[in-house]
Amino acid sequence: MKKVLVARPIFPDVIERLRQYFEVDANPGAPLAADEFARRMADRDGALLAGDPVTAKVLEGAPNLKVVSNMAVGYNNFDMQALNAHGVLGTNTPDVLNESTADFGWALMMAAARRIAESEHFLRAGKWGTWSYDAFLGTDVYGATLGVLGMGRIGQALARRARGFNMRVIYHNRSRVAPEIEAELNAEYVSKADLLKRADHLVLVLPYTAENRHTIGAAELASMQPTATLTNIARGGIVDDAALIQALRNKTIAAAGLDVFEGEPNFNRDFLTVPNVVLTPHIASATESTRRAMANLAADNLIAALGEGPRAGNPPNPINPEVLKK
Ligand code: 8YV
């Protein structure tokens, strides 16, 4: 039997599915520290992970490894160059999380714009004395301009929601999306500079790469409207968190909604003293049915890539399919 590591606790029935095909080492607890992870990968043929860093060092120490299956759509935890060099396949879990993640992005944007978390904290703290015409004034979402940075599948799902809110949709992306998609979404392609300037509500949904680290920093925040909100459901590190904290304190922008942080779960603690930001612990895809779908898809990828199951040799979501041909 081939050997696999399941690096994070996942649904027990999905682990049982894997046990039908493999000898499984399932980590039931906290994320494995880098050394422990490398040690437990050493004799494995495959692994199911969720964001665990797969580095050149890990790959060098795991000569039998054929596949690393990420239970996530984003795979910035994979060193793709090293994966290719070692002929190891990477897989991810796209599509099944689009709608749940877009729902959550929408909720964060709404919460930031309408100051829901901030006003709830006020109520819980027993500070609600009287009605006041100017208490917790926010920014309208209905009829406003939605700015989407990264018009992939989740960005498109967000843009579809904007129709019900009678919003103008502008976007920026590495490349323009197909004209029929632009037409369907009624979305206008603009430069990044125009996106920042014109968006009432800017949502980040782009994949994290070395090139876009801190692509939203002090200068970008300064170019936004003082009434604007920023929502990040993409990856920590795309935003310069220290610069954002400054911008929120100075009211350079009105508010932010953040599900992801640079260095998470060890995020910049200064956020805790900033009232106009809604903070959530990387849960945009966290619904029962979506997380189940992601876990099962990650298992499908692992099973197929290791030559088992109904799709043996043909995993549904290869990131670097070139290695399959070798
Ligand atoms: C994952 C995510 O839950 O899919 C992604 O890229 O950010 C989340 O849905 C998280 O990355 C853990 O793997």
Image: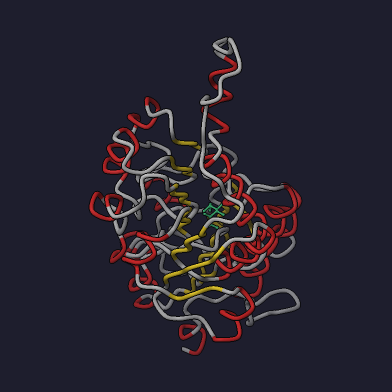
Check the image and name the residue furthest to the front: 133
257 or 94: which is nearer to us?
Answer: 257
* Residue 295 visible (yes or no): no
* Residue 199 visible (yes or no): yes
Q: Position of residue 299 (x, y in %)?
A: 66, 63
Q: Position of residue 92 (x, y in %)?
A: 55, 67
Q: Is residue 287 above or below residue 20?
A: above
Asked which colour scheme the image uses, the reply is secondary structure
Check the image and name the residue furthest to the bottom: 325
Instruction: Give the mark count.
Output: 0
At 34% from the left and 71% from the top, the residue drawn is: 82
Q: Is residue 223 left or right of residue 24?
A: left
At 30% from the left and 59% from the top, the residue drawn is: 215
Q: Is residue 192 left or right of residue 297?
A: left
Q: Is residue 82 above or below residue 311?
A: above
267 or 166: which is nearer to us?
Answer: 166
Q: Position of residue 68 (x, y in %)?
A: 51, 65
Quarter location, residue 242: top left
Quadrant including the N terminus: bottom right
Quarter location, residue 36: top left
At 58% from the left and 44% from the top, the residue drawn is: 110
Check the image and name the residue furthest to the left: 219
At 60% from the left and 85% from the top, the residue drawn is: 180
319 or 59: which is nearer to us?
Answer: 319
- Point out the quarter of the image occupied by ligand 1: bottom right
Q: Position of residue 152 (x, y in %)?
A: 52, 71
